[in-house]
């Protein structure tokens, strides 16, 4: 028996340096957790995803890299991938599912490309599938996949997990009927369909009921070939990895460097991929309003804003980058001076040690998405605070706000109130910081990504075996 995991991104990175190519396996939370489950259940693991490298690079170097599981890249034609990934996945589904209907750029050609890409990936899975395997499909790129696999293998154990929000019916219905049906029927091909929160699960069941006319009983839809259970499975992080990193010598050195650099200031920090759903301008506006409302903080606080480049080929992302950069430069121009830059901005990713040093130096983490399935940055910030210091300001529109009950919640559009909450956070006494951090850490320590993966996969297996035992003799 093996686990076949499918996600758009493969857990590997390819680097070319001095004409030498190296392929390394990346140890993200998801990969580590699925691997751990596969080891415990004595199963092999195969990962299927879309290659962002040439076939020849793979053929020439795949034997030279050490990995803990099998990797099966799918090579898509450039034009097809553009319509599949840039247009349908990221300019239709991403926009709509994050409640940005006016950003949706639907066209039939992109939908056809999405179906073709799902079929190509299904063919690859069907090729390697053996009876008894568990298939775990991830995210909005592959909403059609479970059904395509089910058609070939009616008995397959299939789980589907959506990493982004699932919108309500009024938003979902915006898409043409043929698209809505394809997506919902696609997801219903799974034995288990998981979301980050119950709200998302309820939105999904409402869409299925209203659009496909199926009725659920206790969050289970019965179909001819199998039943589909719908549930909430909030994703998490590898808690120990973030917690233990606090004491790494390199992290300590970097933290000391930050402390020296900002010895007379308090640090507010945020890190996100560049995305319109992250509310980056909302938080910049709130920070500006905070400095205007509480001028005593001028020159005594700095906002370290890290933005990680993302989806740069898509128009709305380039546009957002310009809007953010204009805002940063306007704020720095209006409020800063030759001794002080209020917003220190970097448009690059940071490596793990730097990230932990930044998390553990920040008096406040300011996380203000206007819509987010979960938001793992919030969980990482809490886990990285082995010193039990710091305050988390978190948007109520992030899934994580449902679990991190001791965060100070904000509405990203309530600029004035965020300004006041930043002030309160910076003034919060240490015992209160400690109390809140401790409670959130206690929760995350037991609700980590390993528990998440294992709950999801064992429920997929349970749902499947329940159905198969229930067959009348
Ligand atoms: C979100 C999605 C992931 C995606 C990631 C990075 O977290 O849920 O599926 O991989 O963003 O975006 P990218 O488009 O670079 O894969």
Image (cartoon, rainbow, N blue to C red):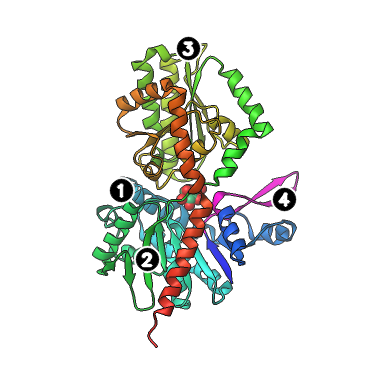
Q: Quadrant of residue 192?
A: bottom left
Q: In front: 151, or 421?
A: 421
Q: Looking at the image, is mark 2 or mark 3 nearer the viewer?
A: 2
How many residues crowd around disc 1 within 10 Å: few (fewer than 14), some, or many (20 or more)? some
Is residue 75 something that shows in the picture?
no
The location of residue 7, given as percent across then percent down, is: 52, 58
Q: Of helix, strand and loop, which one carries label 1?
A: helix
The answer to whether residue 19 is magenta is yes
The residue under label 2 is 229
> At 34% across and 50% down in the image, what residue appears?
96
- Work out whether mark 4 precedes mark 3 in sequence or the reverse, and give the earlier one: 4
The residue under label 3 is 337
Q: Is mark 2 within 8 Å of ligand 1?
A: no
Per the model, the C-alpha gap separating discs 2 and 4 is: 44 Å
Q: Of helix, strand and loop, which one carries label 3?
A: loop
The location of residue 244, given as percent across then percent down, is: 61, 39
Image height check: is 262 above or below 162? above
Per the model, the C-alpha gap separating discs 1 and 2 is: 28 Å
- Work out whether mark 4 precedes mark 1 in sequence or the reverse, and give the earlier one: 4
The residue under label 1 is 101
Q: Quadrant of residue 125?
A: bottom right
Is residue 455 something that shows in the picture?
yes
Please indicate whether residue 246 sits to the left or right of residue 383 in the image.
Answer: right
Q: Which residues are magenta?
A: 7-30
Per the model, the C-alpha gap separating discs 4 and 1 is: 42 Å
Per the model, the C-alpha gap separating discs 4 and 3 is: 46 Å
Quarter of the image for the N terminus: give it.
bottom right
Per the model, the C-alpha gap separating discs 2 and 3 is: 58 Å
Image height check: is 296 above or below 77? above
């Amino acid at each position: 028996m093996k686990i076949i995991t499918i996600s758009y991104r493969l857990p590997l990175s390819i680097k070319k340096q001095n004409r030498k190519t190296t392929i390394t396996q990346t140890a993200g939370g998801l990969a580590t957790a699925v691997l751990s489950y596969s080891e415990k259940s004595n199963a092999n693991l195969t990962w299927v995803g879309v290659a962002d490298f040439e076939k020849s690079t793979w053929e020439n170097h795949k034997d030279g890299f050490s990995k803990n599981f099998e990797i099966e890249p799918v090579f898509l034609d450039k034009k097809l991938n553009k319509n599949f990934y840039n247009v349908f996945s990221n300019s239709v589904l991403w926009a709509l599912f994050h409640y940005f209907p006016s950003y949706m750029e639907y066209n039939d050609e992109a939908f056809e490309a999405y179906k073709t890409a799902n079929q190509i990936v299904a063919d690859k899975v069907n090729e390697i599938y053996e009876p008894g395997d568990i298939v775990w499909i991830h995210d909005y790129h592959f909403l059609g996949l479970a059904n395509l696999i089910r058609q070939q293998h009616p008995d397959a154990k299939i789980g589907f997990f959506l990493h982004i929000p699932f919108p309500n019916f009024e938003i979902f219905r915006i898409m043409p009927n043929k698209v809505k049906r394809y997506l919902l029927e696609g997801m219903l091909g799974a034995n288990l369909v998981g979301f980050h929160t119950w709200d998302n699960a309820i939105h999904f069941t409402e869409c299925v009921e209203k659009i496909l006319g199926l009725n659920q009983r206790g969050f289970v839809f019965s179909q001819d070939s199998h039943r589909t259970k719908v549930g909430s499975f909030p994703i998490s992080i590898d808690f120990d990895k973030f917690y233990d990193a606090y004491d790494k010598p390199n992290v300590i050195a970097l933290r000391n460097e930050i402390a020296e650099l900002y010895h007379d200031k308090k640090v507010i920090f945020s890190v996100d991929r560049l995305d319109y759903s992250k509310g980056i301008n909302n938080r910049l506006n709130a920070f500006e309003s905070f400095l205007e409302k509480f001028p005593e903080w001028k020159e005594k606080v700095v906002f370290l804003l890290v933005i990680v480049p993302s989806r740069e080929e898509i128009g709305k992302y380039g546009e957002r980058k310009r809007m953010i950069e204009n805002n940063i430069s306007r704020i720095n121009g209006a409020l800063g001076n030759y001794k002080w830059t209020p917003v220190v901005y970097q448009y690059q990713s940071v490596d793990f040690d730097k990230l932990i040093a930044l998390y553990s130096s920040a008096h406040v983490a300011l996380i203000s998405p206007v819509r987010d399935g979960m938001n793992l940055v919030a969980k990482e910030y809490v886990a990285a605070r082995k010193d039990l210091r710091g305050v988390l300001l978190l948007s109520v529109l992030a899934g994580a706000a449902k679990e991190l009950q001791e965060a100070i919640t904000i509405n990203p559009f309530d600029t004035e109130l965020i300004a006041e909450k930043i002030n309160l956070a910076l003034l919060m006494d240490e015992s209160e910081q400690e109390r809140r951090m401790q409670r959130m850490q206690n929760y995350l320590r037991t609700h980590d990504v390993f528990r998440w993966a294992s709950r999801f996969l064992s429920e997929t297996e349970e749902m499947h075996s329940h159905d198969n035992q229930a067959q009348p003799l």
